[in-house]
Amino acid sequence: MHKVKALIYDGLCTFEFGIATELFALPRPEFPDWYDFQTIALDMDIRAMGGLAIRAGANLQALRDADTIILPGWRDRSERPPEPLLHALQLAHARGTRLFSICSGVFILAAAGLLRGKCATTHWQHSDYLQSTYPDINVSADTLYIESDNIITSAGSAAGIDAGLHIIRQDHGSAVANSVARRLVLPPHRDGGQAQFVPPIRPRGGKPMAGLVDWARQNLHQPLTVARLAEKAGMSERNFQRRFSAELGNSPMAWVQRERLLQAQTLLETSKAPLKEIAHSCGYDSLDTFRIAFKRELGTSPTAYRMRFSRV
């Protein structure tokens, strides 16, 4: 089982920690090989926001066999974390452990020197401070989450949910991640700056765009051009592209491409249909075009994805 370890510390950010436990610690017997979750205590006496007192049975030594380490915030961005913690994270990263920070947890990774030369994000209120304090990090202030060299950093608290679902999707596939999202009754999922393994986005705007999105998802096998989508929405192409990007956070053609790949992922996981049939049903002119797009966006081939995540 994949071992997930979440750090707790005096001054713990309870919402961020709650994200970690809800996504990875909650028992899900419907999914085989779910995560083995453990809480790791940095301090002897831990008081969380709201006056809660917390105890954990494991210390930093338990990080040695972690597959994923979660850093749910940090109590003070100007406070350097203890050296034993930084050293433990450096060793873990060298071993290939995945590191995941939520919001201000990025300052722990930065202090450990693990983000030098990498892209990272955090809450917009911390972005300028992070960049000025660690100028060797490429800080993205408008990204919900970023993955770089097996390190995932996420923005404000709720963005940690999006990043956590991204992790679940990587480990267990699209169907499982979407099932977890539905069970949590999550709000519309948002693009994290990572095209791969991101579930569908619902528009923030009114009924015309929402209706268009539903129609497009049912007709991905057809040629979907900007002109056709704009006509379906009853708008000029220029106005349509502006409205679409504002409501869904992406261009129409980039959205269509991602939706086609999401549908392909679902079919690969839930059916035994031939790849050529899946490619056609998702709107690709040829199997080669489908394979190229899948590999480029998801970093693996359709066949390899099916072998890993198929449930039929």
Image (spheres, rainbow, N blue to C red):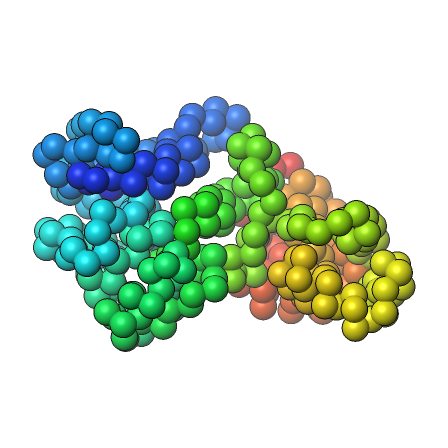
Query: Residue sitting at 42 percent across and 67 percent down?
Result: 140
Classify residue 42 as left or right of residue 208. left
Quadrant showing the C terminus: top right
Q: Can you tell which quarter of the image residue 259 is in?
A: bottom right
Query: Residue sitting at 19 percent across and 33 percent down?
Result: 47
Quadrant showing the N terminus: top left
Q: How many marks?
A: 0
Nearer-the-camera pick, 144 or 176: 144
Query: Residue sitting at 36 percent across and 38 percent down?
Result: 15
Examine the rendering and report whether any part of residue 261 can be seen: no
Q: Can you tell which quarter of the image residue 231 is in?
A: bottom right
Q: At which x and y percent is residue 294?
A: 63, 62
Classify residue 84 as left or right of residue 172. left
Classify residue 286 as left or right of residue 66. right
Query: Residue sitting at 66 percent across and 62 percent down?
Result: 246
Q: At which x and y percent is residue 220?
A: 80, 56
Nearer-the-camera pick, 294 or 19: 19
In this rendering, the answer to whether 48 lies above or below 108 is above
Q: At which x and y percent is residue 59?
A: 14, 37
Examine the rendering and report whether any part of residue 255 can be seen: yes
Nearer-the-camera pick, 242 or 255: 242
